[in-house]
Amino acid sequence: MEVYPYLAFLNYWLNKEDKYSLQGPFISGFYTELKSYLKKELQQQDPFVRERAILSTERGQIQVVDYGAGSKKLKEKKRITAQIYKYSTTKRKFSTIYSFLIAQTPAEHVIELGTCLGINTLYLSQETKGKLYSFEGSPSLVEKARSLHQSPQIEYMEGEISDTLPFHLQAKGKVDFVLIDATHTKEATLRYFQIILPYLHEKSIVAIADIYWSREMTTAWKEILRTTEVSLSLDFYECGVLFFRKGITKSHHVLSV
C-alpha cells in the first residue's frame, strides 16, 4: 500500500482554513461563490450522466500509450474501458469545479492537457465561449473521446504534449484557462507549466490535477507556487488552482470543497 497519499491528506486536513480566515475581497468572494455554485449544481442531475454510464459499463479494450507515470492500478497496455473510467476519470465534483473556474475567465481559448476518456472535456466545453483544445498522447483515447461526444467547439490535439503544445501556443497566443491533468511526473508538469506561462494573462486561471498523486507531483506543485507570476493559489487536495492577478498580495490557501 502506498503511504504517501494518506500522509499528504493528513497534512492537508491539518492545514485547512475556513472561509472566515480568508482576507481580501477577491478570494473571499471567489470561495463563497464557488461553494454556492457547487451546492446548486450537485443537487441537480449530472449533465453527463449518460456518458458516465456508458463508460462505466463498457467492457471493450483500449490500447493505451503512456508517456508519463501511467496508471497506479492499470499496468497493461490494453485496458478495459470501464476500468479506465473507474481509476482515471475525474469525479463529478471536481469536473464541476473546473467548469466554474472557466466561467471566471474570458473562456475564449481553453486548454486541457490529458483528454483520457473525454469526461472532463465535456464539462469544460459547457463554459467555453470560444474553443476548447484537448491534448492527448494516446491515439486510442482520443478516438474514444471523439466517439463519446462530437462538438465543433472541441478540437482534439493528438500526439505527445511536449511536441504539440508549443506549436499550438505559437499559433493561437494568449490562453484563458488551462487544466493540467497529464503525465503526472514532476518533470513533465513543470515543463507544461513553463511552456504555458508566457501565454497567460491577468485573468487566466490554471488548474493542476492530482497535486498529491505522488511526492514528485507535490514537489512540482510547490515549485510552481514560487513562480513570480503566481499571485494566488488554492489547494483543494484533489487539485491546485493558480491565479495571476495583479494588485493583490501573493498568498496560498488550503481549502475544502
Image: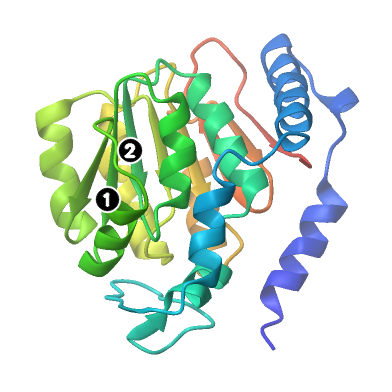
> Where residue 52 sits in the image (x, y, percent)?
54, 56
Which of the pair 224/120 is nearer the observer?
120
Look at the image and tell me in which quarter the N terminus lies.
Answer: bottom right
Name the colouring of the figure: rainbow
Query: Can see residue 169?
Result: yes
In the displayed structure image, the side of residue 232 where residue 226 appears, left or right: left
> Where residue 169 sits in the image (x, y, percent)?
18, 35
Tell me the element at label 2. Answer: strand
Q: Which residue is at a point 52% across and 34% down the rendered structure image?
A: 242
> Where residue 157 sits in the image (x, y, percent)?
19, 49
Mark 2 lies on residue: 111
Mark number, residue 135: 1
Give the answer, above or below, for where 75 lies relative to 149: below
Which of the pair 185/224 is nearer the observer?
185
Which of the pair 83/32 is nearer the observer?
83
Q: Which residue is at a point 33% across and 61% down the rendered structure image?
A: 188
Residues at marks 2 and 1 touching, judged by CB atoms closer than 8 Å:
yes
Look at the image and tell me in which quarter the C terminus lies.
Answer: top right
